């Protein structure tokens, strides 16, 4: 069962979060008269949501008023500002339960915001324009037509100007009221302190118009000293969304910068930490059916299933998105696995990644004879970009008393499986064991094969021969 609430910092973001928090608080102390909007920029998989929620938790513990707004969960609404103000009210109200004055100021601030969110004049404008345009049906095409259109334009312009003034006035009243609330917190409340933090998450996943409108609202309405916005986005993805509205030639990256005072780019997570995150998310880190050909004695401080996944990710140069998709396939196979034998992670991952890289290569590999598969393993690196500097460690005996570690090519984790395809248990038992991985893999096959298959010398179709079909089926998930 998937674990959707992670109890610990699986991507090792603690130090990064502490630095960022310290910077924002110190910056406010030196520049109290400024509002500030920070963009935390990171691609999918960098752990933005976890990072932002942990920041929110830490800010709360340090007595800062903080609002967490999930933009994507609210993008079904037509008015982003309405959803945002609603969350602002819901999040801040509990902070002021013990302070009637502060609570009164919050209520007044929210009331002022309503005049900005739903200006009645816009409805009047729409109704007037429709009714007067309908009257044009009764006007003959002569001088009366020109006079009628002129009258409508004049009335429309006047109403728009009046409405604009009303909205501007409402914005100013909202800002003044919010500023009074912030000043009151600063001077009178020992339980809370400034700045107020507003964290906005998942903006890059929203409808383009929704994201743009929300940013515009923040820029023009919440330009208030004492408030720090932290907005987590994949800036590249958000730029694409803006281009979807304004066209491909629109300078979306430059446009985005006008909303943010600064941008902080998150450090890419280490492959082991990210692999561990994926395994924990799917609750399979220590799954009883998973078999890793890495040695526990060599990787004492690490989970050997997770380590194997991380080594493959580094060797095959998988992006974080690629790794997530590989995990999706792996998880679906584990979830539906009913065989008594173990799942050999070293071979299954190779097949999943091969298909992830190229359906053509995957199909080609499966159509080859057993002997040709060995040759394929030597040549596939010409068609798939790999990092041959990535190796795994194995323990080598020098004598009865001394042992040393040896760095071995990742290919050596795959080769033993190719060698066993189509062989029966007696043949496998005779295979020379040149590396620890060979030894572990061969012994695993033998230990999970009924002894009768040895005595009767029956040919055995090993369950790893079924892996390509499993990958093919599970690979339909994305």
Image (cartoon, rainbow, N blue to C red):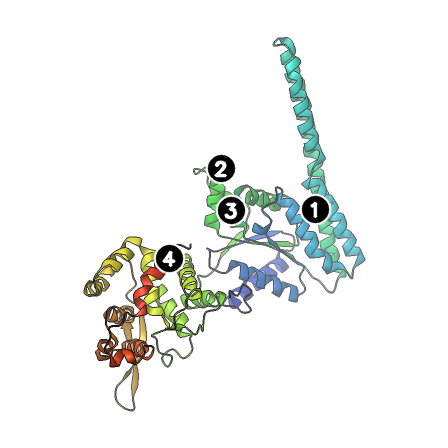
Q: Which of marks 4 and 2 is nearer the N terminus?
A: 2
Going by the image, does 339 lie left or right of 379? Answer: right
**Helix, strand or loop under label 4:** helix
Instruction: Give me the C-alpha separation between circle 1 and circle 4.
Output: 57 Å
- Marks 1 and 3 sit apart, C-alpha to C-alpha, by 23 Å
Give the residue number, with chain letter if any, for mark 3.
257
Nearer to us: label 4 or label 2: 4
* Circles 2 and 3: CB atoms closer than 8 Å: no
Left or right of 456? Residue 199 is: right
Q: Position of residue 222 (x, y in %)?
A: 64, 47
In the displayed structure, does residue 202 sit left or right of residue 464?
right
Q: Are marks 1 and 3 in contact (CB under 8 Å)?
A: no
Tell me which label, 1 or 2, sits earlier in the chain: 1
Lower position in the chain sequence, tag 1 or tag 3 = 1
Label 1 vs label 2, nearer the camera: 2
Sequence-wise, the earlier of marks 2 and 3 is 2
Residue that label 2 marks = 246
Q: Mark 4 points at which residue?
A: 473
Which is more toward the observer, 78 or 213?
Answer: 78
Image quarter for residue 167? top right
Work out whether mark 4 precedes mark 3 in sequence or the reverse, and give the earlier one.
3
| Disc 3 packing (10 Å; few <14; some 14–19; many ≥20) | few
Residue hosting label 1: 175
């Amino acid at each position: 069962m998937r674990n959707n609430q992670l109890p610990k910092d699986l991507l090792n973001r603690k130090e990064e979060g502490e630095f960022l928090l310290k910077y924002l608080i110190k910056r406010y102390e030196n520049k109290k008269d400024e509002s500030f909007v920070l963009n935390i920029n990171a691609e999918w998989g960098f752990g933005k949501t976890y990072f932002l929620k942990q920041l929110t938790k830490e800010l709360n513990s340090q007595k800062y008023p903080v609002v967490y707004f999930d933009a994507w969960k609210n993008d079904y609404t037509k008015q982003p500002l309405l959803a945002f103000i609603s969350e602002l009210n819901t999040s801040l109200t509990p902070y002021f339960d013990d302070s009637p004055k502060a609570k009164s100021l919050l209520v007044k601030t929210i009331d002022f915001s309503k005049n900005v969110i739903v200006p009645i004049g816009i409805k009047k404008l729409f109704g007037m324009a429709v009714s007067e345009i309908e009257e044009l049906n009764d006007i003959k095409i002569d001088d009366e037509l020109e006079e009628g259109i002129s009258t409508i334009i004049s009335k429309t312009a006047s109403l728009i100007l009046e409405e604009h003034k009303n909205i501007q006035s409402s914005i100013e009243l909202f800002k003044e009221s919010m500023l009074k609330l912030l000043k009151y917190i600063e001077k009178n409340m020992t339980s809370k302190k400034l700045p107020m933090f507003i964290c906005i998450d998942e903006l890059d996943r929203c409808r383009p118009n929704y994201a743009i409108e929300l940013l515009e609202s923040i820029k023009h309405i919440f330009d208030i000293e004492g408030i720090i916005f932290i907005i987590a986005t994949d800036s590249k993805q958000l730029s694409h969304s803006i281009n979807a509205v304004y066209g491909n030639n629109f300078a979306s990256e430059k446009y985005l910068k006008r909303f943010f005072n600064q941008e902080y780019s998150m450090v890419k997570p280490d492959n082991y930490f990210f692999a561990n995150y994926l395994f924990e998310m799917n609750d399979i880190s220590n799954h009883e059916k998973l078999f890793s050909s890495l040695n526990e004695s060599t990787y004492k401080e690490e989970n050997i299933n997770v380590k194997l996944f991380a080594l493959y990710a580094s060797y095959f140069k998988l992006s974080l998105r690629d790794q997530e998709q590989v995990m999706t396939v792996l998880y679906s196979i584990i979830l539906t696995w009913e065989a008594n034998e173990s799942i050999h992670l070293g071979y299954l991952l190779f097949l999943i990644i091969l298909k992830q890289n190229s359906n053509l290569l995957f199909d080609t590999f499966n159509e080859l004879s057993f002997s040709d598969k060995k040759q394929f393993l030597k040549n596939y690196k010409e068609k798939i970009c790999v990092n041959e500097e990535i190796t795994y460690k194995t323990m080598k005996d020098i004598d009865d008393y001394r042992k040393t570690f040896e760095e071995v090519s990742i290919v050596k984790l795959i080769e033993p499986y190719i060698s066993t395809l189509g062989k029966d248990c007696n043949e496998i038992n005779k295979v020379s064991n040149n590396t620890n991985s060979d030894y572990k893999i061969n012994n695993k096959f033998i230990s999970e094969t009924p002894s009768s298959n040895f005595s009767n010398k029956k040919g055995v179709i090993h369950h790893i021969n079924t892996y390509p079909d499993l990958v093919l089926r599970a690979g339909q998930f994305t």
